[in-house]
Amino acid sequence: MKILEFSVRRMLDEMVYVPLDYDSRYIGKEVISVFGYRFGKSGMSLILSAFTSLLPSFDIKELTQATTAMALFWTASAFHLSAMVPSRADAEEAYRKMKATPK
């Protein structure tokens, strides 16, 4: 798990931020770091604890089904959100327009 986290996810995180300007990269990394990683881990821990305490018959079969459903939901969300990330050309064009606009 740690190998995948450090070798794949960190690299992909950086690739997502490449087309963005400096301020967007900085804010995006901080927001994802706080909300995505920390709250995601804590939230999933709380959800799994609630499942096991509220549903005593929640065994490995139900856990596998719930995990598969959430993985499919996460994958669909990731593809939907990836369509919202601007391409490098679009980001550079938006940056040029922003720089050209007098303040």
Image: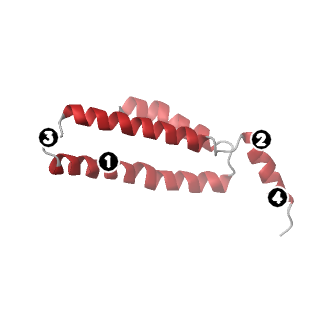
| Label whose residue precedes the other's in the sequence (2 or 4) | 2
For mark 4, what is the residue?
99
Separation of residues labelled 3 and 4 (CA atoms): 60 Å
Separation of residues labelled 3 and 2 (CA atoms): 53 Å
Identify whether 7 is placed above or below 88: above
Foreground disc of the pair 2, 1: 1
Identify whether 3 is placed above or below 14: above
For mark 2, what is the residue?
89
Query: Which amino acid does the dot numbered 1 rest on?
Result: Met
Image quadrant assignment for residue 64: top left
| Label whose residue precedes the other's in the sequence (2 or 1) | 1
Foreground disc of the pair 3, 4: 3
Separation of residues labelled 2 and 1 (CA atoms): 37 Å
56 left or right of 47 in image? left
Query: Which amino acid does the dot numbered 3 rest on?
Result: Ser
* Residue shown at 47% from the left, 51% from the top: 33
Q: How is the image coloured?
A: secondary structure
The tag on residue 44 is 1
Quadrant location of the C terminus in the rendered image: bottom right
